[in-house]
Image (cartoon, rainbow, N blue to C red):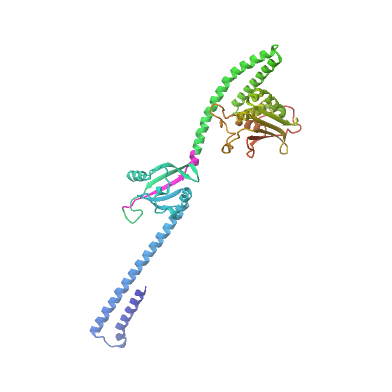
Amino acid sequence: MGLITLSTGLLAVTILELANPLWEGTGLDPRDRNQILISGSFHLLTLAASWAVWFSIRQRERDQQRLSRSEQKHRTIINHAGEAIFLLDRQGRVLEWNKAAERLFGVARRAVLGRPLCELHLCYGLELDKALTDAEELNRSLTFEFPYLRNRQPDGLIKLTLSPLPPGRTGDSPTDRAFVVIARDVTSERQLENRMSQAEKLAGIGQLAAGIAHQLNTPLGSILLSAQMLSDANLPEDEAEDVDRIIRQTEQCRQIIKGLLNFARPQSRERGPVLLDEAVHETVYLMEKNLRVAGVEVELQADGSAEVLGNRNELDQVFFNLLVNAVDAMPDGGRIEIRIGDGDPGEIQVSFTDSGTGIDGGHHGQIFLPFFTTKDYGKGTGLGLSIVARIVHEHGGRIELDERHHPGTRFLLNFPRPNLGIGSRTAETP
């Protein structure tokens, strides 16, 4: 800008030197005039060149400003993208790294720029060099999935799409080639797909179980009929008690099968007042021999007035399944404590505690799911607690695992007290 000012001033002086003799009415010597004209032409060319340089510099500055704004705009867009986006050169070095990539891989941008991606241990199981070569040769996007270890999560899974950019789009050399990479965590998606697949398998197992249950009803009916015929005979007292126990347990099995068949399709059932301590006592009596063989002692504490409105057979299933699970959890014997008393206002609570091995903390959220079991293969169907939870919920109650109790397991069952004025028998549709 100083050169332009100087050239303009010198050119003005030259013009004044040419105009001054004309104003004074005197002529110029031809040699002086030629010298002034040559000097003026030089100053004019210098001025024109200075303006050309200035315009060129200003244009370059404007271009740089536009480029800077454009880069800032695109970087802002990339940083606000929901998926990890980064740029790699042909050697797999990181050229760009957005905020989502920082969150996904747990590495800051300043720590990753210029470094090979695999050097950062971010591509477990992915042959990055081969992937870059394949994408360049095929000249199209390629998608990969590979596990990653972050926050001590070995089951993490990343889906990565690698796309080659045309040569010369990045870097100073027109032969340079870069690759844009879009990555996202698909761990939750895969887990959801696995759960859906598992649900389909469980549906098939449920259909199979329903078919087996239908088939079991026939031999159970035969056993029940034979036992009832024996009960009509004149048997000694001990044998009559054994036959009566066979009848009760066979009827219990039939009710369990019925509950299994109705598991996915609850039906209306008649309900009436049920004394909980009576239901628990009779269920314990039915399992007396099993408990004695297993070395399990049962203690029942109840005031005898805890009454709920429900279905007796279904409530028998609840306590039967809880007892079976407790016995299975105490292979070397133990103790079961059942307490029936007041719960929250308007509720009756049944506390069912065993001294067994307990339930692993990682399984607390799954124990009431159908077909979920921690027992060895062939020793459990995973239906017991799910049926218990369904029956309790259909009776307007709730069942909870007391996670604070250890060792052993404690279930808390809460039932609503029957309202005054309700008849002795009602029909309720769950």
Between 352 and 356, which is closer to the camera in this rendering? 356
Residue 275, can we see it?
Answer: no
Residue 367 lies left or right of residue 44; in this view the side is right
Residue at far top of view: 234
Q: Which residue lies furthest to the left in this view?
A: 31
Measured from the top left, where is residue 136 in percent x and y?
34, 46
Residue 308: x, y in percent?
Answer: 72, 31
Residue 251 location (% of width, % of height) = 65, 21
Q: In which quarter of the image is residue 348?
A: top right
Say which quarter of the image contains residue 15: bottom left
180 in magenta: yes
**Quadrant the N terminus occupies:** bottom left
Relative placement, left or right, of 150 versus 35 is: right
Above or below residue 355? Residue 136 is: below
Q: Nearer the viewer, residue 216 or 154?
A: 154
Residue 172 seen by the camera: yes
Q: What stretch is highlighted in magenta?
A: 175-190
Q: What is the quadrant of the C terminus in the image? A: top right
Asked whether 49 falls inside the magenta stretch, the response is: no
Does residue 129 lie above or below 311 as drawn? below
Numbered-mark total: 0
- Nearest the eye: 418 or 187: 187
| Nearer to me, 256 or 77 | 256
Residue 290 place in picture, x, y as percent:
64, 24
- In the rendered view, tell whether residue 369 sits above or below residue 250: below
Which quarter of the picture shows residue 292? top right
The image shows residue 205, relative to residue 363, as above or below, that is above
Q: Residue at left 36%, top 74%?
A: 2
